[in-house]
Image (spheres, helix red, strand yellow):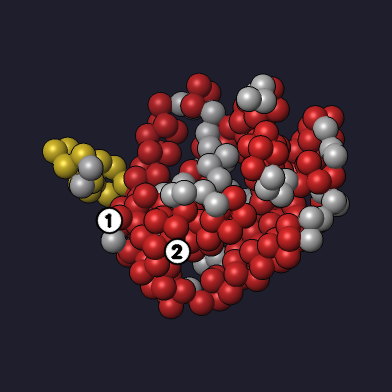
């Protein structure tokens, strides 16, 4: 994804910092086991959040001691390859695969074709393992691509397209029957909208130089509009999140959604254009 959803580490308790590392490393190990060691390069903070959110909603929290090929001399605490971590691994590969294709098509980023080629095998395996998830992502990306090619001047339309993509992802998630199956897709909808808007605002200067589509530039929307829409999306995500009965990972998820997102949003909005 984009790397915007993560904890505010200054406010994390020591236990929560260790917990986050365990799930980040666990997701990395799961990606390597399912898709090969090179596929670990697709690891993202955003998909770590998805794994934690699903695990919190489902009550998953088991960890183990395991070795990391990048740090082989000491075992590390890692999340087990449960349903939430495995789902997040499939999601990570598929999102990275489609994003690299989009980066080359829209911006001609030089590294995108190499990355896309490197993920070709893992992406094919992910498509076989999770065809419905792949279909949901592919349809969402197609809608986004159409809006961008048309030069859509309505800021909400592309943001909503990515939000609906993430809601469809949530509908495919391995969650128990009950309220979580209804609520988690709504959390992901609003977080998807927030991520899209964050990325679009963050990339304004680069997109203007390249002549690439940018929703804020197309809509001639300024900082006041960005602040309003980002705050609205975060508040809506928090409203849905608070409907979940979460005990596992609650402190860490609270930090990410309340403090981490707010800190990241301030950083992006206050950054000076280059």
Query: Toward which corner of the image does residue 158 lie, by quadrant?
Result: bottom right
The spot of residue 156 in percent (x, y) is 82, 51
**Residue 118 image point, x, y percent:** 36, 60
Q: Which residue sits at x=30%, y=55%?
A: 38
- Residue 10 placement (x, y as % from top left): 50, 21
Q: How many marks?
A: 2
Location of residue 124 (image quadrant): bottom left
Q: Residue placed at 85% from the left, 52% from the top?
A: 154
Q: Which disc is residue 201 wearing?
A: none
The reply to whether residue 7 is in sight is yes
For residue 47, above or below residue 94: above
Q: Nearer the viewer, residue 221 or 167?
A: 221
- Name the residue that disc number 2 marks: 90
Left or right relative to 34: residue 128: right
Q: Is residue 177 visible?
A: no
Near-viewer residue (48 or 220): 220
104 or 147, which is in the foreground?
104
Q: Nearer the viewer, mark 1 or mark 2?
A: 1
The Cα–Cα distance between marks 1 and 2, rounded to whole angstroms, is: 14 Å
Label for residue 37?
1
Q: Secondary structure at mark 1?
A: helix
Q: Residue at x 79, y 55 (%)?
A: 151
């Amino acid at each position: 994804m984009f790397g915007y959803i993560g904890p505010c580490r200054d406010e994390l308790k020591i236990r929560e910092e260790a917990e986050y590392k365990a799930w980040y490393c666990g997701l990395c190990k799961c990606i390597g086991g399912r898709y090969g060691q090179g596929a670990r390069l697709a690891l993202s903070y955003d998909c770590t959040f998805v794994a934690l959110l699903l695990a919190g909603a489902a009550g998953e929290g088991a960890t183990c001691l395991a070795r990391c090929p990048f740090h082989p001399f000491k075992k590390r605490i890692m999340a087990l390859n449960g349903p939430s971590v495995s789902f997040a691994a499939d999601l990570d590969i598929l999102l990275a695969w489609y994003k690299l294709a989009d980066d080359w098509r829209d911006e001609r980023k030089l590294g995108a074709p190499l990355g896309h080629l490197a993920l070709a095998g893992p992406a094919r395996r992910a498509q076989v393992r999770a065809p419905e998830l792949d279909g949901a992502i592919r349809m969402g990306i197609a809608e986004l691509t159409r809006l961008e090619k048309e030069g859509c001047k309505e800021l909400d339309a592309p943001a909503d397209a990515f939000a609906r993509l993430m809601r469809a992802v949530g509908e495919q998630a391995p969650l128990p029957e009950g309220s979580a199956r209804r609520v988690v897709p709504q959390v992901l909808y609003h977080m998807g909208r927030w991520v899209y808007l964050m990325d679009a605002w963050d990339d304004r200067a680069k997109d203007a130089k390249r002549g690439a589509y940018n929703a804020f530039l197309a809509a001639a929307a300024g900082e006041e509009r960005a602040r309003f829409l980002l705050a609205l999306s975060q508040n809506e995500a928090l409203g849905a999140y608070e409907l979940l009965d979460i005990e596992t990972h609650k402190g860490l998820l609270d930090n990410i959604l309340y403090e981490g997102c707010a800190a990241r949003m301030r950083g992006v909005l206050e950054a000076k254009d280059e």
